[in-house]
Structure formats: structure tokens, C-alpha cells
Amino acid sequence: MNTTELPDLKLLQLFDLLYDVRSVTRAAEQLGQSQPTVSIWLGRLREHLQDPLFIRTPGGMAPTPQADALIGPCREILESLRRFTAWEIAFDPATAKRRFRICMTDASHITLLPRMLAHVREHAPGIRLEAARIDGNTERALESGEADLAIGHVPWLGGGIYQQQLYMQDWICLANRRHPRLRAKLGLKQYRAESHVAITAGTGAQLLEQALTREHIERDVVLELPGFLGLGAIIRSTDLIATLPRHIGETLAEVNDLAIHTCPVPVDRFAVRQHWHARYHQEAGNRWLRAMVVQLFGNPT
């Protein structure tokens, strides 16, 4: 046997077929080739394996002892190649045992995570979710597989990161329903005059600050918060105003019985997207996770 070169795949397929049909003519028909071509392939295979492999007899092409010995390994190779070309690690959410780590903002802890958890507990009880921060380490975590997904407004993520838009966010203002000076529409003049809570973290906060600078508006900020924890209770118990993205704003308003006002400042809308690394684009578990997020929150308009 020539050990320096592997036989072509088509020669192994011919060997497998010829062993069953015992006829060069029938093998040629099933392979869609001419009989002379198949005869040439058989000659090359005989030369490669240094054995006649099949001997012409009145009953057809009879395999030699060498062919009998090689048919098993040949079929193992072909089956391995078939599994290789159709390879995909199975992921059944109903039975899978796995942890998914999702980078998200604290606003998403309030608006997205409860629905995700409810869906997972119903449809994938063996799955464990872990929420992590979006920060300067997020891109590296997605690349290494330390994190599976990032959800939010993260325009600074670099190359190799796929993204899919989920929904658009505009801006609203929240106030106490019994605010002593707010009975109807919140106008720009009153917005300037009132005292505010400012959320200082996140790219959304940067968009708001850019809009305030562009419109030459300086708010009377009496409280700064690094996130949304406790914001609803503060608005409910004071006469302060908060300006924040609609999704988290409407959620806090419903939970805390707050009044929602149209934001009088023209702040740029932004897209909330899910992000994942190209290394895991075809990975079955990651695909399931992304499909779940789209099912729960997808609304690209």
C-alpha cells in the first residue's frame, strides 16, 4: 500500500459500492459515471492498495481476501466523513444542562431578565442564567466564551462581533403622580425649572447629556445615581423628575405608580441590540439563546 498518499474519496465510494453490487457496470450507473471512467478509478485503487481487490468470475466481481479485510475500515471512514459534514452539537433546551452568561445593563435586569427567566424555567429547566455587567471587558469575554451574549446599546464593540437589532428606544420623563407643579404636559420651561435625578452610567446617559448640551439646557440635579436601583421609590416619594429611556421608564412607572411625560428635550433615539462573537455564530446553544431573545423582545421598528 502506498502510505504517502491517501486515496481519493471517490475511490473509497467506488470500493464500498462495488463490494455490494459486484459489477463495474452497475457501479458506474449508480455513481453517474461511464464504465471506462469507473474502470480507471478501480485501476488506481488497485495500484494504491497493491491488490486486485475484485476478481472477475461467472457470478460477478468477487472480492479478494484483502478487499474483505479492508471493507470495514473503508466504511468506517465514509461514515466518519458523513458525520463530519453534518456535524452539529445537539442542543435540546428541554434536557440541556448549561449556564448562559449574558452581559446587560441594570435596566435590563428590570425590563428583560424577568421575562427571560420565566421563559427558561418553562421551556429549559436545566438552563442557568447569569447576568454580568457591560464594561470594557465585554468584548474579550464574548470572544473567549466567558460570556455568551451582550444585550444593550454597545456601539463600541469591535470586529468579530455580530449584532442584531431588537427594538428602538426613545426618551420619557417620570414624575410623582401627585407632583405639586405637574398637572398636564411637561414643557421645556418647566423642565428647566424643576429639580432632577440624573442617571450617570451607560451610553444612554451620554446621549442625554449630549442633547442637553446641544440644546443649552442645564438641569438642577439634586441627586445622581449610578443606575436605576431605587429610582422608582425616589420619584414616588419626592417632587424630582427623571429623564430615561422608555423601556425602563414605563416599567418603573407601572411598578411604582408614576406619571409618564413626553420628554421635552429632543434626545436621539438608540437601538438595543444583542451581540455575540463570530466564533459562536453557528454554535447550537448560542443560536437557541439568540432565538429566544428575538422571540421575547424582537421589534426592530
Image: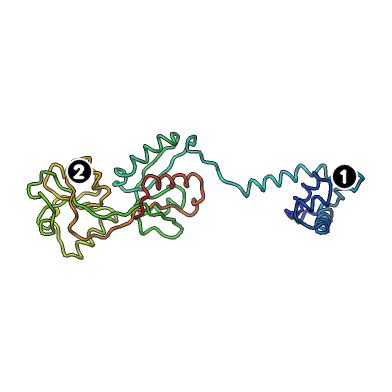
Name which residue lies at 82% across and 56% down. 35
The first of marks 1 and 2 along the sequence is 1
Q: Is residue 63 above or below residue 277?
A: above
Instruction: Look at the numbered disc 2 and give the secondary structure of its residue.
Output: helix
Q: CA distance from mark 1 to mark 2?
A: 85 Å
Residue 106 coordinates in the image, percent (x, y): 29, 46
Q: For residue 72, what is the image quadrant?
A: top right
Residue assigned mark 2: 232
Nearest-to-viewer mark from 1 and 2: 1
Q: Is residue 255 above or below residue 300?
A: above
In the displayed structure image, the side of residue 45 where residue 86 appears, left or right: left
Q: How many marks?
A: 2
Question: Residue at the right extreme?
Answer: 58
Residue 209 coordinates in the image, percent (x, y): 22, 59
Residue 225 coordinates in the image, percent (x, y): 21, 49
Name the amino acid, label 1.
Answer: Ala
Q: Nearer the viewer, residue 146 or 27?
A: 27
Residue 131 coordinates in the image, percent (x, y): 36, 43
Instruction: Look at the numbered disc 1 and give the secondary structure of its residue.
Output: strand
In the displayed structure image, the side of residue 108 where residue 287 appears, left or right: right
Name which residue lies at 73% across and 44% down. 75
Residue assigned mark 1: 62
Q: Quadrant of the C terminus?
A: bottom left
Name the amino acid, label 2.
Answer: Gly
Q: Residues within 10 Å of mark 1 (few under 14, many from 20)?
A: some
In the displayed structure image, the side of residue 97 where residue 16 appears, left or right: right
Q: Nearer the viewer, residue 166 or 198?
A: 166
Q: Nearer the viewer, residue 17 or 52?
A: 17
